[in-house]
Image (cartoon, rainbow, N blue to C red):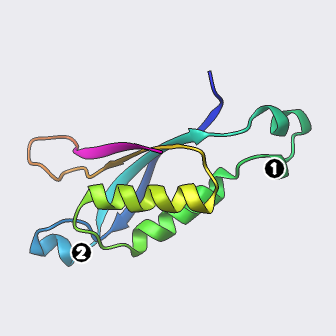
Amino acid sequence: MADKIFIEKLEIRCIIGTLPKERKKKQKIVIDMEFPAPVSKPAKRDDLRDALNYKKIADHTVKFVSRSCFHLIETLAERLSRQLLKEFELKRILLRISKPGAIRNAKNVGVEIQRP
């Protein structure tokens, strides 16, 4: 099994949606992600310089998403995955974006993508 890092339930507020009321006020979305990461070398030396800095990835995600104003979560997922792959030289990313409360009587709705 390949080593990986995951971030779960990262809550961010952004403009997302197609309805007029969704375009006026930021809503909560929830992001889960996982990506391959070196674990053996950083663990051996116990040194952050050898590791993939997941705090920087989370901070970058919050900054990007909170400034975004896409209509579709599909668009947000695609653009965010491209940003993270490029900025952090990730080989792959599994990204899940949820929009709780978007559908009446449903706990959650969202999209999941894996790139590349």
Q: Main SS type for the magenta part?
A: strand
Q: Is residue 111 magenta?
A: yes
Callout 1 crowding tier (Cα within 10 Å): few <14, some 14–19, many ≥20: few
Residue 5 as seen in the image, left or right of residue 83 = right
Q: Residue at x 56, y 65 (%)?
A: 60
- Residue at the limit of the structure toward the bottom, as seen here: 24
Q: Which element carries disc 1, helix, strand or loop?
A: helix
Badge number at residue 92: none
For residue 1, above or below residue 27: above
Say which amino acid is labelled 2: Lys
Which residue is labeled 2 in the image? 25
For residue 79, above or below residue 49: below
Q: Is residue 78 visible?
A: yes
Q: Residue at x 23, y 61 (%)?
A: 72
Q: Nearer the viewer, residue 56 or 72?
A: 72
**Residue 97 at what x, y percent from top left?**
35, 49
Q: Residue at x 84, y 36 (%)?
A: 41
**Residue 46 at what x, y percent from top left?**
87, 40
Say which amino acid is labelled 1: Leu
**Residue 66 at what x, y percent from top left?**
41, 70
Q: Label 1 vs label 2: CA separation?
A: 38 Å
Q: Are marks 1 and 2 in contact (CB under 8 Å)?
A: no
Choose top left, top right, bottom left or bottom right for residue 91.
top right
Which residue is labeled 1 in the image? 48
Q: Nearer the viewer, mark 1 or mark 2?
A: 1
Residue range in magenta is 109-116
Callout 2 crowding tier (Cα within 10 Å): few <14, some 14–19, many ≥20: few
Q: Nearer the viewer, residue 17 or 94?
A: 94
Q: Earlier in the sequence, mark 1 or mark 2?
A: 2
- Residue at the limit of the structure toward the top, as seen here: 1
